[in-house]
Structures are given as structure tokens and as C-alpha cells.
Amino acid sequence: MTDRILQPIHVQLTLDDVKNFQNTALLVVGDVMLDRYWFGDTERISPEAPVPIVAIKKVEERLGGAANVARNGASLGAKIKLLGLIGNDEAGLQVQHKLAQQDIESLLQIDETVPTIVKLRVVARQQQLIRLDFEEEPAQDSLTSKFASFEETLPLVKGVIFSDYGKGALKHVARMIELCQQAGKLTLVDPKGDDYSKYAGATVITPNRSELRQVIGNWSSEADLTLKAQNLREGLGLEAILLTRSEEGMTLFRAKQVSHVGAQAREVFDVSGAGDTVISTLGVALAAGWDWDLAMALANRAGGIVVGKLGTATVSWEELL
């Protein structure tokens, strides 16, 4: 087996690169959310309980979950379609509005029985004090309707990114991946949970360290990690596993080859949404014809940039290259 260490790569952007990215069409499928941020100041403790009182000064709303994956792909110029579920509510309208603002084609299905998933974060003095989640399990009828829309859209895209946050929108993911295989589509999965069998046949999965440990257990050395990761990759019939390792960079496991790229040194401010940036950058680059190592280096660079920003964020071409 070949092991390679990749140094940080400076990518010289050409007009052809820009055109290839802009001509790349991808479908993002998964758990769609709205991220809300309430920013304020806190100077005293509540007389009612030992908690800070926060005087809210500013409110921000951003696309989250699978919608943030779509947002990141669109920021690189790719043509992005987003398939998922929202509720018939104000938060769902906000999601649709923000997708339109960023030229992301919405294929969202409305589930009348549940609210749009919302994550509300209260932030004071650049410190997150609490996160409140609003979510319910989607209805089966909505999932069936979403699957039909997936079948119709698949022939129109180069590849599919599945963003699994474990909220129920990807209950048909195994069948969807099977259809991607039959159609010869690039298939990327940001996985969730301890059962990866539902992702069998995908092109690549992109777990972080804690997610991979849930499936293969702890590893005692790099050799032990390689053995366990390669066994998982072969058992699931994957072309690759991209392991994101925070300050240790990334490791790409493929048949008879393991590649590493070191982390980009920078201050880490907020890791939320970094996985979304990584998988969207990787997907766009691979769909545009870039090789695996170069696509990984680009995704690593993007992830290194986005952790220096607050909350779910994107990277621009200027920052990336």
C-alpha cells in the first residue's frame, strides 16, 4: 500500500477551472435547517435563576444543515439544486427566500405536519451561551414525495451530495445511492450514526474522527486506523473514505493508497458547519474533473478558512485560492 504526505498546495486558478466549476451541476439532499443567531450583551445575572441576562442587539439567519452544503457549493459557482423537507411556516419561507438569493434551485417539499428545523443560538461577547433546537420527525408521505422528486432530478446533475444530520430526511438514502450507482453518478455522503451500511455503494463518505470511531472503534496507531478504515471501505464498496481530523488535517483512504494532507494553521473560532464546507468543496472539485488529492487539498483549505468564522459560513474563490 502506498502512503503519501501532501504539502499545502497552491492552486493556480485558470479560466478553464472557473468554467468547469460553473458548469458543474450537483444535487444536495438531506436535512434542511435554518440557523438563527441572537447576538447581545450580558452584564448581570438573572434574579430568577443563576443564568446571565442577555440583551439582544442583533439577529442573523443563515441556511443550515443540507442547505448550508448547498450554499457552500453555490459560493464556488456551481449550479446547485437542493432537495429536502421544510414546514409550512415562517422559518420555511425564510429558507426558500435565502435559497433564491443565492441562486440555489429549491426542490424542497413542504411537510404540513412538522415545523422547519431551526437551531437558535444565543451569543454574547463572542461566546455561545445556549442552543435551542426545534425539530420533529417528518411524515412518511413527505419522504415518499421527496424520493419521487429525486428520481426526476438525478439525470440532470453530475453528482449527489447526501447531508445526513440524523433528522429523518434521508430514510430512503440506501435506495437513492443505488439509483446513483445505476446512473453512474458521483455520490458523496456526510454520514451520521453508527450504522454505515445504508451508505454502501457511495463514491466517498466524509466522517470526522468521532463519527468514524462510532463505527470502527478506537485505533491504536496510524497502521491500525488504516487497516480498520480500509476494511470499512471495502466492506461498503466505497471508492474512498475522507477522514477529517481537525488539527491533524485529512486522510484519504482509497484502494491500495492512503494520502494525508496537514491542517492549514489558523485560529479556530467556530467549527460548526465546517463539514458542510469540506464535502461541498470536495464534491464540486471532483465533479469538475479534479483528481482526488487535489480535491482533498482544496477541501482542506476551505475547511481551514471556515473554522475562522462564526457559525455556518462559506468561503469565496478569493479566500480559497
Image: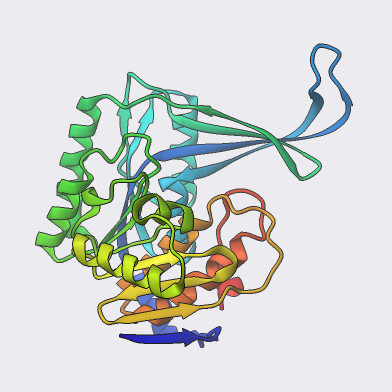
Q: Nearer the viewer, residue 306 or 22?
A: 306
Instruction: Examine the image and state in which quarter residue 36 appears.
Output: top right
Q: Is residue 153 above or below residue 60?
A: below
Residue 154 occupies quadrant? bottom left
On the rendered structure, is 21 left or right of 123? left
Q: Position of residue 137 (x, y in %)?
A: 34, 26
Relative image position of residue 24 (x, y in whole percent): 32, 68
For the question of whether residue 24 can be seen, the reply is no
Residue placed furthest toward the left: 182
- Quarter assignment of residue 8: bottom right
The residue located at (22%, 50%) in the rendering is 197
Q: Of 39 and 213, which appears nearest the observer?
A: 213
Give x and y (percent) for residue 277: 49, 60
Residue located at (15% from left, 40% from top): 148
- Residue for point 41% across, 80% down: 259
Dividing the image into 4 quarters, which one contains the C terminus? bottom right
User: Would residue 167 be seen by someone viewing this image from the given angle?
Assistant: yes
Q: Residue furthest front?
A: 220
Horizontal side of residue 9 vs 66, given as left or right: right
